[in-house]
Amino acid sequence: MSSLPHQFNRCITSQLIKWFSNFREFYYIHIEKFCRQFIADGVSSASDLSVTRDSELFRALNMHFNKGNDFQVPSRFLEVAEITLREFFNAISLAKDLDPSWKKAIYKVICKLDSDVPEVFKSTICW
DNA sequence: TCCTTACCTG
DNA sequence: CAGGTAAGGA
């Protein structure tokens, strides 16, 4: 009740930030992986790419982020995942991946689509 | 100069 | 996932 809580708070907050950061990495790594696979499989247009709750991509992400299906993944997540997938597709199609920092342009677009952290996390993950 | 974040490693 | 850090922003 005195000084410790503050340290805990600060510590846990940074841990959560790190946690989400790792999630973000996982997210992008897998979307790129699936995207390249789609291309290898012959998908020719970004419009042919979609992400639904039945998609393998979704399953992979959900398996990692929401293993026990403790949350109902908002449809917005699917939309953003699809946008991200198409963003990667277009970039790779244009051979932009030749540039060492080609992903930054994508990150810049996607981060603007970030949703706020749901209240459940703020109120549930406490000490 | 402090804080955040992307990148890499274990 | 956590730790460490170089790089960039305020």
Image (cartoon, coloured by chain):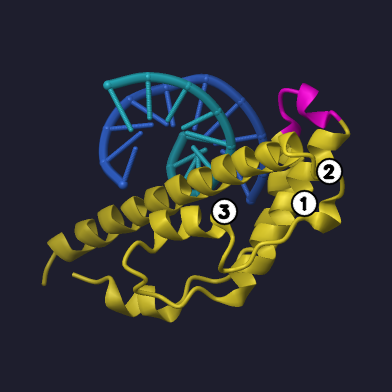
Chain colours: A yellow, B cyan, C blue
**Looking at numbered disc 1 in the image, what kind of residue is underneath it?**
Arg
Pointer 3 residue: A57
Count of marks, rendered view: 3
Q: CA distance from mark 3 to mark 1?
A: 13 Å
Give the residue at x 75% y 32%.
A102
Marker disc for residue A86? 1
Check contact, mark 1 vs mark 2: CB within 8 A: yes
Q: CA distance from mark 3 to mark 2?
A: 18 Å
Give the residue at x 60% y 38%.
A33
Dot 2 lies on which element? helix
| Magenta-drawn stretch contains A100 | yes
Q: Is residue A64 above or below residue A28?
A: below
- Residue A38, horizontal then vertical, whole percent: 71, 43
Protein chain holding label 3? A
| Magenta-drawn stretch contains A50 | no
Give residue C8's quadrant in the image: top right
Quadrant assignment for the N terminus of chain A? bottom left
Q: Is residue C6 above or below residue A11?
A: above
- Residue A87, horizontal then vertical, whole percent: 77, 48
Pointer 2 residue: A90
Give the residue at x 64% y 59%.
A81
* Residues shaded magenta: A95-102
- Residue A13, horizontal then vertical, whole percent: 34, 58
